[in-house]
Amino acid sequence: MKVMAQMSMVMNLDKCIGCHTCSVTCKQAWTNRTGVEYVWFNNVETRPGVGYPRTYEDQEKWRGGWTLNKRGRLKLRDGGRFKKLSRIFSNPKLPEIHDYYEPWTYDYDMLLNSPSGEHTPVATPKSLLTGKDMKIGWSANWDDNLGGSLETMDQDPLLAKMSEEVKAEYEKAFMFYLPRICEHCLNPSCVASCPSGAMYKRAEDGIVLVDQDACRGWRMCVSGCPYKKVYFNHRTGKAEKCTFCYPRIEVGLPTVCAETCVGRLRYLGLVLYDADAVAAAASVEDEHDLLDAQRGVLLDPHDPAVIEAARAGGIPEDWIESAQASPIWKLIRDYEIALPLHPEYRTMPMVWYIPPLSPVVDVVTNTGNDGEDADNLFAAIDKLRIPIGYLAELFSAGDPAPVDLSLRKLAAMRSYMRGVSMSDHRDESITEAVGMSGPQMEEMYRLLAIAKYEERYVIPPAHAEQAHDLEEMGCSLDFEGGPGMGGAGPFGSSSGESVPVAVENFHSLKNRQTSDRPSSPGRVNLLNWDGNGTPEGLFPPEDGK
Amino acid sequence: MSTSAILLWVVLPYAAAAVFIVGHILRYRYDKFGWTTRSSQTYENRLLRWGSPMFHFGILMVIAGHVVGLLIPRQWLYAIGINEHIYHLGATWMGTAAAILTVAGLIILIYRRRTVGPVFLATTAMDKVMYVFLGATLGFGTLATLVYQVFGPGYSYRESISPWIRQMIIFQPHPEMMVEVPLFFQLHVATACALFALWPFTRLVHVFSAPIPYFFRPYIVYRSRDESRGAGSRPVRRGWDPVAAPQPRGKRGSNR
Ligand code: SF4
Ligand code: SF4
Ligand code: SF4
C-alpha cells in the first residue's frame, strides 16, 4: 500500500443556479490573457446539451481517455507511444478553435466616437483571432438554459444513446447545470499522452499541472483528456489547464471557483488513496464496477493501518487530520451520495458530483403533490426512469442503481428534515428506507444544507500556517523589472524566463489594458480595467500636447 | 586563395556553428518558456493535415540522406557493398522523392500561413525571416539535385563538399575544396550556414525537443512541489523565511 494524498472537490448539483460566477471569476484570475480567450478552466453546461467543446463526451469521435486492450490491460484510447509520435506533426483528434468557439470582442469605440447621425451606432463584433468583423455563431454556453437546444440537443452524445421518444420527453421534463473543472484524475490520460513529460501529478496533493518551461506544444494532452480540460494557448504555443488554484490551496485558501460560488455548493478537501491500487481499479472489466473500484482505492483515514502507512509515506500529521475531517471523504464514502463524472473514461476523476434532486421535486410539485413527502419522491424517482438514465450516463457509466440510491438519500433527507423542523418529529422509518440513521441524516443535512465555510473547505493547515507570510501578491513589486515581465520577448509572444503565475497574470492584465485590441486603438477597454492606476490611454490626450 | 573563399568557406561556417551552439545554450538557459513548436493547428487543420506531415517526414529523409552523403566517408560505404553506382542511384532518386515531399509540404504550409487569417496574424517577424532562409536552402538544394544529378551529368560532391565538411569538423579547413563546386551547391551550403546561424532564434529549436524519452518513461509522471519556492507562487527569498510554529515532539513534517 502506497498512501498518497489528493486534493479533491465535490459539487452539489442541486444548488447550482447556473449563474456562471465561477466561470467568470476563474477566467478573471487565470485566463484573461491573449491566447486563451476561448479557454474556460471552469465552465457551466446546461444538460441536456452539447457541452464545451461541442460533443466532447463522444469518445468515438474524440478518442480521449483510456480503454482496455484485448488482454484487458489499460491503453490510451487514441493509441500508445508509437502512434502518438507518428501523429505528432498533425494531431487528427485535436479540436479546432471552432469546436470551442471563435473568441470575439466588440468595437466599443464606435459607441463613443461615432459622429452624431440618424442611426444609433452599433458595436460590431470583431474576431479576436483575425481582428475582422465576424458573425457570432457559437460560444462556451450557447445552449444555456436550453436556449436554441431544439436545434442542437440531438447532438448531445448522451442523449444520442437514448431513443427518440425519450428525447422529446426530456426537453420538457428535466434540466440542470453541470459546472466542470479539470478532474485532477488519479490516472490522468493527459499526463500519459504528453510526449515531453511536461505534465505531471504533484506527489504531495495530486494536483495535475503543466510545466510551462518543459511544454513543447505537441498538443497530445489536449486530445488525450476525455474531458477536454487541457487547452492550447495559441499565442504562447503551450498547453494550459485548471491549476486547482494551487497558489491559493498551498496557503490554505479555497480555489477561486469554490470561494466565489454563489450557491456555495463546492466542497474541498483531502482524500488518502492507495497509489498502488489505481491501475488495477482503472482496469476492471465491467464499466459498472468502475465506481466501486474507485471508491475502493480511497482509503479510510480513520483506519489505524492506513494512518501508519500514511506516516511511513511521509504524509504530515496535520494532513492526516485534514483527511479525517474531509467533507469529500464523508460525501463519497460515509454517505455515498457523491458520484464521479464519467467513470467509464477510466481516468479515475477526482471532482465528484451529488446528482440533482430538484428536477424530481419539480415534477412532483407541478402535478400538485407534496414535494417534501418521502413516498411521493420515492415514487417519482421510480417513475422518472429516463432522466435517471441520463444522470447514470453521466455519473455511473449508465448503471442507474448508484444514482437512484443517491437521489433517494437526498429525498429522504428532505422529508426527514421537514419533520424535524416543522414538528420536531424524527421519523426514522424514512432514513432506514435508505440505510441511514437519524443522527447521520442530520449530520449530512448540516454538511449539505447549512454548509458552513470551514466545513466545506478543509484545506490542510500545514499550508495555512504559512499563509500569512506568503499571501500572494503581498509584495509583487519585488518582481518589477525582472526578466520577461510580460509582453512580447525577442522570440515571439511571452518568451523569456517564466515568472510566478500571480505576477504573470498581473502583467498580462496590464498588457491587456493597453494592447491587442482590434477596436478602439490607443484607448483603454474599460471592461478589462481592474481599477488600479491610470493606464496609458485611459484619458484622451490633453489639448496642446 | 582568395579572401572571399576563406570568408565564405571557413569564416562563415565556423561563425554559424558558433552562433548555433552558443545560441541554443543561451536560449535554453533564458527562454525555456519560448521553446515550443508554436503550433497553429487549432486555427486551421485542413491544409496542415497534409502539409505538415509531408514537410516533416520529407525533411527527416533529407537529413538522413545528408548524414550518409556528407559525414560517412565513401570508403566505409564501399566496404559494406554500396558502390558508387548504387549510391548515386539511391541518393538521386530517394533524394528527389524526399525533396519533392519536403518542398511540396513547405509550399502548402507557406500558402496556408499567408492565406489563413489567424495563422498569418500569429506569424512573427522571426518566422518570416526563417521561412526565407529555409525556403532558399531547400530550393537551392533541390535545384542542385535536379540540375546536376537528375538532368545533368552528375556531380560527385563526395569528392569535394563531403571531405570539406569533415575537414571543417576536425578543424583543418580546406576552403579550396569548395571553390570549384557548382554554383547551386555553393548557394545551398551558404544559405544553410545562414539558416544554422538563425536557428536558435527561431521556432526551429523544437527540433531539439524531439520527444524520444517518451518511449522510455512511465506513462504517469509524478513530481514534487518545487521546494525552492514557498507556498503560493512567490519564491522564498533570503531573510524572508516563513515564520513557523516550533515543531511538536514526535510529529514529523507538519511544517512543510
Ligand atoms: S480531467 Fe484533468 S487530470 Fe483528468 S485527464 Fe483531463 S486534464 Fe488530465
Ligand atoms: S480550481 Fe481554480 S483554475 Fe481550476 S477551475 Fe477553479 S478557479 Fe479555475
Ligand atoms: S457559481 Fe456556483 S451556482 Fe453559480 S454556476 Fe457556478 S457552480 Fe453554479
Image (spheres, rainbow, N blue to C red):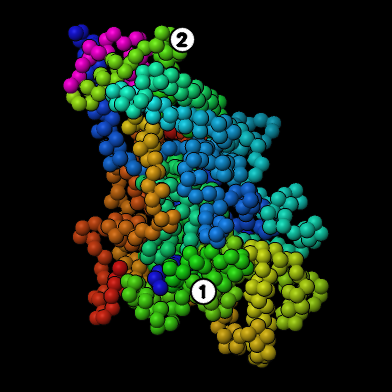
Please provide the residue range marked out in magenta: B172-196
Question: Magenta span: helix, strand or loop, mainly?
Answer: helix
Dot 1 corresponds to which residue?
A296
User: Does B104 appear in magenta?
Assistant: no
User: Which of A403 and A113 lies nearest the eye of the viewer?
Assistant: A403
**Res A243 quadrant in image:** bottom left
What is the C-alpha distance between the residues marked 2 and 1? 72 Å
Q: Which type of secondary structure does the marked residue at label 1 adopt?
A: helix
User: Does B175 appear in magenta?
Assistant: yes
- On the image, the x and y values in percent for residue A101 come to 60, 43
Question: Is residue B103 depicted above or below A222 in this figure?
Answer: above
Q: Is residue A61 visible?
A: yes
Question: Is residue B73 depicted above or below B215 in this figure?
Answer: above
Question: Is residue A445 depicted above or below A506 in this figure?
Answer: below
Badge 2 amino acid: Phe
- On the image, the x and y values in percent for residue A498 come to 34, 46
- On the image, the x and y values in percent for residue A136 come to 65, 40
Can you tell which of label 2 and label 1 is closer to the viewer? 2
At horizontal 20% and vertical 26% (from top left) the residue drawn is B170
Q: Quadrant of the C terminus of chain A?
A: top left
Asked if the beta carbon under badge 2 is closer than 8 A to the nearest atom of ligand 1, the reply is no
Q: Is residue A514 visible?
A: no
Q: In the displayed structure, does residue A383 sit left or right of residue B184?
A: right
Q: Quadrant of the N terminus of chain A?
A: bottom left
**Residue B151 disc label:** 2
Q: In the displayed structure, does residue A350 sit left or right of residue B199?
A: right
Badge 1 amino acid: Gly
**Res A70 quadrant in image:** bottom right
User: Which of A391 and A538 lies nearest the eye of the viewer?
Assistant: A391
Q: Which type of secondary structure does the marked residue at label 2 adopt?
A: loop
